[in-house]
Amino acid sequence: MIIDIHGHYTTAPAQLGAWRDLQVAFAEGRGDAPDPASLRISDDDIRETIEANQLKLMDERGSDLTVFSPRASFMAHHIGDLGVSETWARICNDLCARVSRLYPDRFLPGAMLPQSPGAAPATSVAELRRAVEELGAVTVNLNPDPSGGKWTAPPLTDRSWYPIYEALVEYEVPAMVHVSTSCNPAFHTTGAHYLNADTTAVMQLIQGDLFRDFPELKLVIPHGGGAVPYHWGRFRGLAMALGKPELEEHLLGNVFFDTCVYHQPGIDLLTTVVPVDNILFASEMIGAVRDVDPRTGHHFDDTKRYVDATSNLTDAERARVYETNARRVYPRVDRALTSRGL
Amino acid sequence: MIIDIHGHYTTAPAQLGAWRDLQVAFAEGRGDAPDPASLRISDDDIRETIEANQLKLMDERGSDLTVFSPRASFMAHHIGDLGVSETWARICNDLCARVSRLYPDRFLPGAMLPQSPGAAPATSVAELRRAVEELGAVTVNLNPDPSGGKWTAPPLTDRSWYPIYEALVEYEVPAMVHVSTSCNPAFHTTGAHYLNADTTAVMQLIQGDLFRDFPELKLVIPHGGGAVPYHWGRFRGLAMALGKPELEEHLLGNVFFDTCVYHQPGIDLLTTVVPVDNILFASEMIGAVRDVDPRTGHHFDDTKRYVDATSNLTDAERARVYETNARRVYPRVDRALTSRGL
């Protein structure tokens, strides 16, 4: 079985974007807040967008199950206030849960949190609970920079984040550390901001001792861990200089990297440097990079090809990357599969 | 011959830091501006710090020549105003030039620029000219984020930067794109901010068409290019989506990556992905990571070991990484060596 732990509903029906446009206008002082009930998306609308896109590619590429969360760049926590984010998160999370209910064998829902710049992370806990308890979310995306590229939030090791971690541990839900759109012209969203956030988060975790307080917390760093595996020696050396233990002991009981690295040498590096039990298969499909590589004739983001081809993994190890690790890190994924006899 | 194009005077005599402390206090409204003439550093002070540190390690590791610029984390352009940065840059640049005059066979000076948040980049041109014409600087460090982690400057492709590029092209001087200390608690300086800046700069260059306007401009991205080589497929795909040519055509006539990647798999990845003519030997010694790797018994930042050991390079290619590329990208290094019959 092949589980892709990183997919977003980037192809949601156009009504969603149109509704959000009204909400953004409201947040900017133009017009009234749109009524969530005015957003009408039928099951057929959902089927159409999923079957023509994600499901089609999953079938072509051979992945069985995707952990499916709201479009990351659309979370845009920097827009409006906490109330705006709360309404928007409910809508987006409900939609991903509907995808999962329509295709229970193929998608399990992830959730976004209603973060907002300056709002205490504790304000996200209610939606986190709703997403897990009512929608069946198996993970949440945690944005370390709700400001959208201004980086005004304290590091992830700050105690203000702890209420979220407490809820995650209580529910056995891992978080993916994932930023949203950059509103800073210095940072291209998917080419700089996403990767920078991955690197930044890992370094924050190296500087702190978060997992002493939360030994059961699991954090997934997307996009292959940003710059981290490529600079593994640098991070080991910085950890030493900070008086921290080796990264295996300091981080790797709790931190996992996905395989959203879009070329063979990158996957080869990842699987050389990071222990196999800390690597989770993912493609972020349909995501930042949608084209076919003219040099290979295959989609850049068809990461299964690279994982299949790397000589660093035995077949048994590949099975851990594809399935076993995900079932261990995402206990709710495992339970969903077990309940289906898988 | 082995040329290290990335060294900083991180071990400058203590008087320098003490003088800077007075200047920082002045910038913060405490005390008068210290007189540059009050800073006394003797040639013997310089010899002591260089011979016990950089020169010793260069001899141990077998590198011949270092391009030596002011300590990157001490540039701290976010402190004070333009006048503060101008005075500080002159002092630091003069000091690196003195190192080079004391050891002309072993060090050639690089310069910092007197950047300041909100100040037009054009205000740095006078010191750039002084550094090249009077001090013999062979390169400058260009900070894409003078705010120190707030990222308030426009992208490097913005026309406001053009006066600097015009001077660089006029002098045949390449710039290393290198940030300074992060004053943003989200970003560890050497573990996050440096690498993020490398990634950010490359993505800015991908988004723009800077080298159409400056076909002779050369930019060096330190720290192995941040996350870029590890995510080469992602950047190729993003360039395609932006309607840009392949990176070889779009960037690699003008953009070069150093070898400050502190483990073997990282150097193996770099030399797999980036064409050999775009790789420049460097260690950033003595820099961010100073410890000995307990697993190898060697310094993490002894990058020559990784370059020597990688199976991706022939001896002829290694010679390009060690010497020929640097002489091509840094014409003033080449002329200095040629004038010595080398």
Image (cartoon, coloured by chain):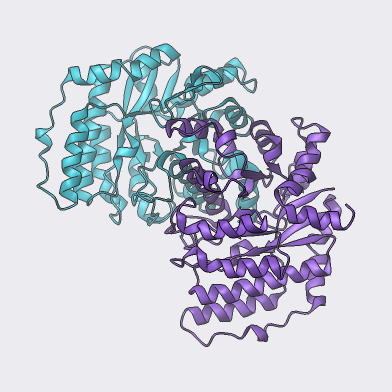
Chain colours: A cyan, B purple
In front of the other: A335 or B66: B66
Q: Residue furthest right?
A: B341
- Up the image or down, A53 lies above or below A279; here it is above
Residue at coordinates 39% horizontally, 50% vertically from top-left? A185
Name which residue lies at 44% across and 24% down: A291
Instruction: Indicate the position of residue B311 as horizontal and vertical percent values.
Output: 77, 30
Residue B261 quadrant: top right
| Nearer-the-camera pick, A13 or B21 | A13
Which quadrant of the structure image shows residue B167?
bottom right
Residue A246 in view (yes/no): no
Please give left or right for residue A57 compared with residue B220 in the image.
Answer: left
Q: Position of residue A44 (x, y in %)?
A: 18, 17
Q: Residue at x 51, y 46 (%)?
A: B210
Residue A256 in view in this figure: yes
Give the vertical position of B252 relative to B73 (above or below).
above
Q: Is residue B120 left or right of residue A147?
A: right
Is A185 or B28 nearer to us in this picture? Answer: A185
